[in-house]
Image (spheres, rainbow, N blue to C red):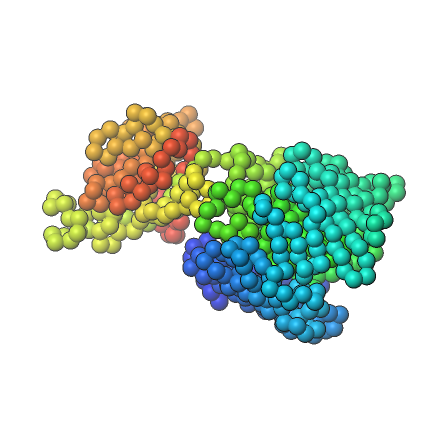
Amino acid sequence: MFALGLGYTGGDNPQYNGNIAAMQWATKDFGANTYNFNYDGANRITVADFTGTGQHNTSYSYDKNGNIMSLTRQGKLGASEFYGMIDQLTYAYNGNQLQSVHDVNDPNHQNNGFTDDGSFLNTEYTYDDNGNLLTDLNKSLSIAKYNHLNLPEQLNLNPPQHYYEISYLYSAAGQKLHKATHIDYTTATTTNYVGSFIYQDGQLQTILTPEGRVVVDGSSYEYQYFLKDHLGNTRITFNQSKQIIQEDSYYPFGMAMAGLSHESGVDLPNKFLYNGKELQDDFGLDWYDYGARFYDAEIGRWHCIDPHAENYLNWTTYNYVANNPILLVDPDGMDWFYHSTNGVSDPTWNWHDGSEYNTGVKNSDGEDVVLQGVKAVVVFEGSVDEKLGTKEKGDKGYDGKHTDGYMDGEGAKTANVTVYGPDGADDVKTYTGYTMSSDPSKYGVVNDGIYDANYDESGKSGALKSNWTLNARGRVSTYWNNPNKPNQKDNKGNYYLTGVFIHRSNNSGWAGGDVSKGCLLISPNDWKNFNNQMNGVKNFKVQVTRTTHPPYSLPQTN
């Protein structure tokens, strides 16, 4: 039904920093399609080149605060079989607040994608003192009331023919409980949200499940399932008979691709779509409800300030996931982060406000996979081929004693260290490290894995003093046994190290001899910055991951 492949170092624009370079997907109805992405120096998407069914190229530009300045989109032209340019948007701002968005004034642009709805004024968006949107002339929208959490309670849409209104009721914590729509001051529909149960006009209509939904029609119940991509976007909705009910594809930033989406026409449309959030499409509003804020996918912006804006001081508070919507998701409109695509494999780390994140998937035992939050994470990405280099007299850092064993010497191969620090999404920094100890065959090395780590008050003494230790100086799994401590083997025959710290090499960069008896090293040039970033952290995680290149094999001692 749906197949997806992500490329990082391949495609037209290879990426070597974790950005997704290419996305390929295939479905029965629309065949194989590919996006190749490019980014600017701040990891903001700038180009999405499309090949496949139709034309869906997009491009973006930004100001220094991360506000979108221009956006272009190709797409299907109405109900015809033709494709062309549907959006050439230009944005104008007062500070970080959007003032206007203008598209080309012709039928292809105004009848597809974003529409100006007849408004080409210099000021089309206005705000209250809290930074919440009050008017959007491009949608003939005015918001009459917000609650104490800056959630909209009454939205009025006033095209020439009718008066439309959408009203919301929330719990004290901000959970949506009730929605009503009105046409010419008469109630048209009511929707009640009771946990996972959704009632339409007083009748139970849908029950949300971890795998999709149950559609209720009188006394009959049909189980339907959602196939999602790496961002949690619903791509295929199908039933127990494997009949496809709905297929959805998305431009970057979440607007639906008209040419690559369809509904059966006879089944209840699924509105839990982009990032799995519910589309509010009443009267052409077309916003997604993320819980803390509503998101406008047509223009790629929020219309209210981030409740956790203090975590993102370098960004406009209205931007969506730092303008990298191919890699990042926003679970509730407050903080963004990324994680393993299936929730089971090792997580990739970034800031998420809160102590845990439920991935929405289950493990082999049927249990929810929940990632636990931590204060900071130190990731060593290395190789079993890491080695120390050489220096000669006259070389910078040569200590006058040793010609080999230097982290920064000729021929050295080191590890990359990424620290996801305690100050949020902007506190991610990289350093040079080393994971293979001074003499792997003598001292052993820390095994690949994720370890608890902590700040040790007494710390490691001596010239290479450190307070950062793994497993509270306790047992840490190792590739090799340690001949110097032959008894360090558990009852299953697995060897382990103790007293493992993260510390620097000598100031000269020399890491030979017994500088590292299995410990993880940070370059002396980075040691001060590493400690400054980790300042105040008491408990954190350390992840060690290496690449192994066959036919290299790890020596074993029995």
Q: Residue at x 67, y 53 (%)?
A: 287
Q: Quick check: 162 left or right of 315?
A: right
Residue 442 seen in render? no
Is 389 above or below relative to 377?
below
- Give the left or right position of residue 289, taking residue 347 as reference: right
Quarter-wise, where is residue 87 in the image?
bottom right
Q: Position of residue 243 (x, y in %)?
A: 77, 54
The C terminus: image quadrant: top left
User: Which one is nearer the viewer's eye here, 345 or 126?
Assistant: 126
In the picture, the quarter occupied by the N terminus is bottom right
Q: Position of residue 197 (x, y in %)?
A: 76, 38
Q: How many marks?
A: 0
Q: Check the image and name the residue furthest to the right.
A: 218
Whether 9 is drawn above or below 202: the answer is below
The residue under the point 52% across, 54% down is 96
Q: Is residue 302 left or right of residue 428?
A: right
Residue 231: x %, y % from top left? 59, 51
Q: Nearer the viewer, residue 542 or 293?
A: 293
Seen at 36% across and 35% down, the residue is 535
Q: Nearer the viewer, residue 66 or 352?
A: 66
Picture quarter containing residue 160? bottom right
User: Which residue is nearer to you in this view: 486 or 162?
Assistant: 162
Q: Compared with residue 118, is residue 403 higher up or lower down, i.e. above or below?
A: above
Residue 539 visible here: yes
Name the residue rendered at 75%, 70% in the picture. 79
Residue 316, relative to residue 171: is it above or below?
Answer: below
The percent position of residue 47, horizontal first and vertical second, equals: 52, 65
